[in-house]
Image (cartoon, helix red, strand yellow):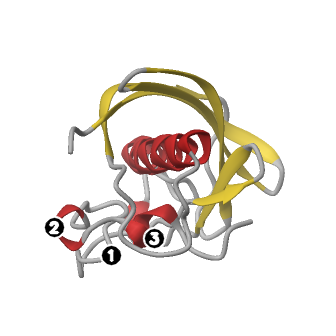
């Protein structure tokens, strides 16, 4: 796994996302790491993200998959184009064009959640990534994102 998260390599003016921006003091600060041919991120939700007692609300699950998906897309583009991810800023940033989330089981509160992403394909500025969100090895949600690379 790379030592730096892709979100920590975004240029300052593009690092304010509520879910993953390092410059958003009130944000979630999700971090996506490239690990071989997939990406991984972790997040532990607390009670402010409650749907029903003990379970995370679906909007947070979708938000985590959204940010992990665009971060994964940027990391996969860097990997494919041989762009080093050791120092900031990387010249790749992506936004969401489409996000599909399937909820498989309740997402538990207060437990470490693991998000994983696998590249499906890249076609020009379009990047498709398949994702899972799990707790203790049990898949709580799956997702797929179509991310669009921002033009320079």
Please tell me which residue lies in front, 137 or 150.
150
Label drawn at residue 13: 2
Q: Which residue is mark 3?
A: 47
Residue at left offset 58%, top offset 49%: 82
Please tell me which residue lies in front, 86 or 146.
86
Lower position in the chain sequence, tag 3 or tag 2? 2
Label drawn at residue 22: 1
Q: Mark 3 or mark 2, which is nearer to you?
A: 2
Residue at left offset 42%, top offset 41%: 62
Measured along the vertical axis of the image, is residue 79 above or below residue 130?
A: below
Q: Secondary structure at mark 3?
A: helix
Residue contact between numbered discs 2 and 1, judged by CB atoms under 8 Å:
no
Lower position in the chain sequence, tag 3 or tag 1? 1
Residue 108: image quadrant is bottom right
Q: Quadrant of the C terminus?
A: top left
Q: Secondary structure at mark 1?
A: loop
Q: Where does residue 151 sit, x and y in percent of width and height? A: 21, 38
């Amino acid at each position: 796994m790379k030592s730096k998260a892709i979100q920590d390599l975004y240029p300052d003016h593009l690092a304010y996302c509520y879910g993953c921006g390092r410059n958003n003091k009130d944000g979630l600060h999700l971090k996506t790491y490239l690990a071989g041919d997939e990406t991984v991120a972790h997040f532990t939700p607390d009670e402010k993200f409650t749907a029903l007692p003990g379970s995370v609300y679906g909007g947070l699950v979708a938000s985590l998959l959204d940010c992990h998906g665009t971060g994964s897309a940027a990391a996969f583009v860097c990997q494919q184009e041989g762009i080093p991810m050791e120092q900031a800023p990387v010249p790749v940033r992506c936004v969401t064009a489409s996000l599909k989330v399937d909820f498989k089981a309740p997402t538990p509160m207060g437990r470490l959640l693991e998000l994983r992403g696998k590249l499906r394909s890249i076609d020009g500025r379009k990047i498709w990534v398949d994702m899972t969100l799990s707790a203790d090895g049990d898949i709580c949600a799956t997702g797929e994102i179509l991310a669009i690379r921002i033009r320079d």
